Image (cartoon, grey):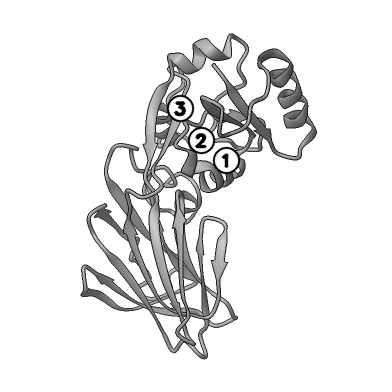
Amino acid sequence: MKFHFLSSKNTEAKEAEKKLVDMYGQNSAKEADCIVPIGGDGLLLKSLHSLNNLNKPFFGINYGSIGFLMNNIIEKDLNETINSAKKSYFKPLKMTATSIDKQVFEAYAYNEVSLMRQTHLASKIKIKINDVIKMEELICDGVLVSTSAGSTAYNLSAHGSILPLDSNILALTPISAFRPRRWRGALLSETNKIEFHVLDNKDRSSSVTADNVEFRNIDKVNIESSNDNKCLVLFDSKHSIEDKILNEQFNF
């Protein structure tokens, strides 16, 4: 099997990359059978965004701080581990954002799309689902929409629900909601189309981020699940992502 290895900047990840290249050789991403990011979740997400057009599977190895989406350090044969790995397809969110001056931006997110206040003033956001107004005004620091794969990241920190990977559900989660104070968000089918309108957007300016890409001074955001740029991510059969998501719900 041909591998393309890439690593984050930390010393341990660089040393692991060198060791694996010495053992298995290095191939271009285009020629490889599998792309192997060595680092943390951020490196895996960056790799998915930059290399998904090659239609290659990804097998991440954890040398980061958390590495929830990564596999444990491999001590046995990498070929054997990957051949027996469990397959998980990561379906991204497609975000279309319109700025106050009518510029239109598009981006994809494998974890989440988050709309956040830019100033000391709280954001005021109108929420529509499938063109129907579900909330006239949410006063908050922000609001996010998370995929099941991203539900254990920012979404969980904002007290959103953890979603099984095969649930076909999106988590819509407020960030520090002021009004309505007790609203904890919603769980939505992947078939739903979500729309955020920023109210009083000149005084209460907001930015939107799709994974690691940010756009500022936003008026409106449309979000939907997309089959475009779907990626195949591999997990060690003994430590599947489904098991990680299940176990995370019982950690305190």
Q: Are marks 2 and 1 in contact (CB under 8 Å)?
A: yes
Q: Secondary structure at mark 2?
A: loop
Marking on residue 234: 3
Q: Secondary structure at mark 3?
A: strand
Q: Are marks 3 and 1 in contact (CB under 8 Å)?
A: no
The quarter holding residue 106 reads: bottom left
- Residue beneath the point at 38% across and 43% down: 230
Dot 1 alpha-carbon crowd within 10 angstroms: few under 14, some 14 to 19, many 20 or more: many
Q: Is residue 80 above or below residue 104?
A: above
| Residue at mark 3 to residue at mark 1: CA–CA distance | 14 Å
Which tag, 3 or 1, sits closer to the chain's start? 1
Marking on residue 41: 1
Instruction: Tell me the residue that label 2 is attached to.
Output: 69
The percent position of residue 202, horizontal first and vertical second, equals 50, 90
Q: Residue furthest front?
A: 31
Q: Which of these two is toward me, 207 or 126?
A: 207
- Residue beneath the point at 37% across and 36% down: 89
- Label 3 or label 1, whichever lies nearer to me, is 3
| Residue at mark 3 to residue at mark 2: CA–CA distance | 10 Å
Q: Quadrant of the N terminus?
A: top right
- Residue beneath the point at 43% across and 30% down: 241
In screen coordinates, is 249 left or right of 128?
A: right
| Residue at mark 2 to residue at mark 1: CA–CA distance | 6 Å
Instruction: Give, as a three-letter code, the residue at label 2.
Output: Leu
Q: Is residue 128 above or below residue 4?
A: below
Which tag, 3 or 2, sits closer to the chain's start? 2
Q: Is residue 170 above or below residue 203?
A: above
Instruction: Give, as a three-letter code, the residue at label 1.
Output: Asp
Q: Secondary structure at mark 1?
A: helix
